[in-house]
Image (spheres, rainbow, N blue to C red):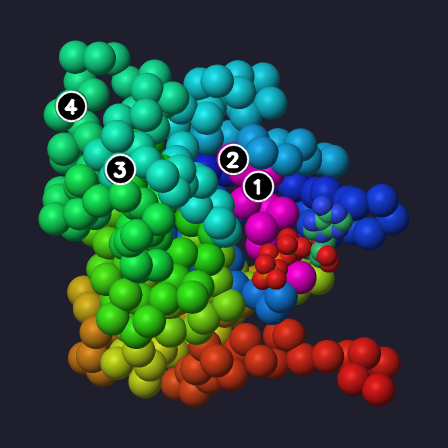
Amino acid sequence: MTAEVLLETTGLARAFGPHAAVRGIDLRVGRGECLALLGLNGAGKTTTLEMLCGVLAPGAGTIRVAGHDLLAEPRAARQCLGYLPETPPLQPDARVIDYLHWAAVVRRIPRSRRRHLVERTLERCCLGGVRRRVIRNLSRGYQQRLGIAQAIVHQPPLVVLDEPTVGLDPRQVQGVRALIGDLRRDHGVILSTHVLADVEAACDRVAILHDGRIIHEQAVAPAADGDRRYRLRFDRPPRPDAVQALDGVLAAEAEGEQSLRVVVRDEAALDGIVAQAAHGGWRLRELAREVRTLEQVFLACTAPRPEEAA
Ligand code: ATP
């Protein structure tokens, strides 16, 4: 990843009594990237996000937010992130504009910049039309937008969203996904979900979380590109960035010691990879179309073990 790293965790873990909810998670999110944590109910998504945001103390591991160690410099690290919890922390009796001003104060935005940032956030989250409305009277979709607005009013580099589309109707879902797409242009975003369509619509990478562990991670290609994924096996594998730099290659990542998974714009890009493999002495041994959809990968990864299914 060449982008500025905004979130880095190593060995993140947390237990509740004897139950290990999160068991050693390593994550990286760069600016301009949206990472999805995808998992079944109880996989450990919320626990992970709460630790990232300083809401829950980790049992083990390190967390760096925009270069600040969350445990050693909590104030600096938390100022660099915005968090939408599963239930947005709204004040039902407040008006939208007053609540956002309050959020700006809590986030220590200097008085001189407050009005400007609140206005910018209202516009960005398409809340201008409801600015004077009382929050409890807003639809669920607008309340969710406001939840995101309070998370980004101080323009944090990293935005953390816990199940941002849960409980919304299809049009509201579309609106929130579009907002996430807008956010990821100049922030880093990490979100949790169990909705595969959210991942495909709004995210660049997905980490599948199961039983407190990341058991699979991959780049997300738009659904329409599902048939342009390939797995390449080499005797002397190149670095993924050397392949990603080739014409028409949209994504490349290592899989195990010898293989790379790539997403290409069209089949012509494969000619470029094959030519560069010969030129660079990578010894290409296998090139196969990746047929598994994200849904298939997810279902395979999270299938109950025989003793659980019984
Ligand atoms: P969901 O999609 O249902 O929100 P999740 O992936 O966010 O699930 P978590 O809420 O992180 O999962 O929970 C992970 C595990 O930790 C679950 O088994 C849950 O019951 C347990 N757990 C979470 N919080 C607590 C708590 N405060 N006390 C005890 N157990 C907890």
Magenta span: 42-53
Disc number lying in front (4 or 3): 3
**Is residue 281 in view?**
no
Q: From mark 2 to mark 4, how far is it between C-alphas?
A: 26 Å
- Residue at 43% across / 82% down in the picture? 293
> In the depicted view, which residue is nearer to us: 223 or 310?
310
Q: Is residue 131 above or below residue 45?
A: above
In the image, which is nearer the foreground, mark 4 or mark 1? 4
Residue 48 covered by magenta stretch: yes
Q: Is residue 295 visible?
A: yes
Q: Residues within 10 Å of mark 4 (few under 14, many from 20)?
A: some
Residue 95, numbered label: 3
Asked if labels 2 and 3 touch by Cβ distance under 8 angstroms, the answer is no
Viewer-nearest of discs 3 and 2 = 3
Residue 268 falls in image quadrant: bottom left
> Residue under circle 1?
50
Q: Chief secondary structure of the magenta span?
A: helix
Q: Nearer the viewer, mark 3 or mark 1?
A: 3
The x, y position of residue 54, in whole percent, is: 56, 31
Q: Which residue is painted at 26% across and 37% down in the image?
A: 95
Badge 1 amino acid:
Glu
Q: Is mark 3 within 8 Å of ligand 1?
A: no
Residue closest to the eye, 254 or 238: 254
Q: Are marks 1 and 2 in contact (CB under 8 Å)?
A: yes
Dot 2 corresponds to which residue?
53
Labels 3 and 1: the sequence-earlier one: 1
Q: Is mark 1 within 8 Å of ligand 1?
A: yes
Indicate which disc, 4 or 3, sits on the residue closer to the N terminus: 3
Q: Disc 4 designates what residue? A: 115
**Considering the numbered disc 1 on the image, is that residue within a helix, a strand or a loop?**
helix
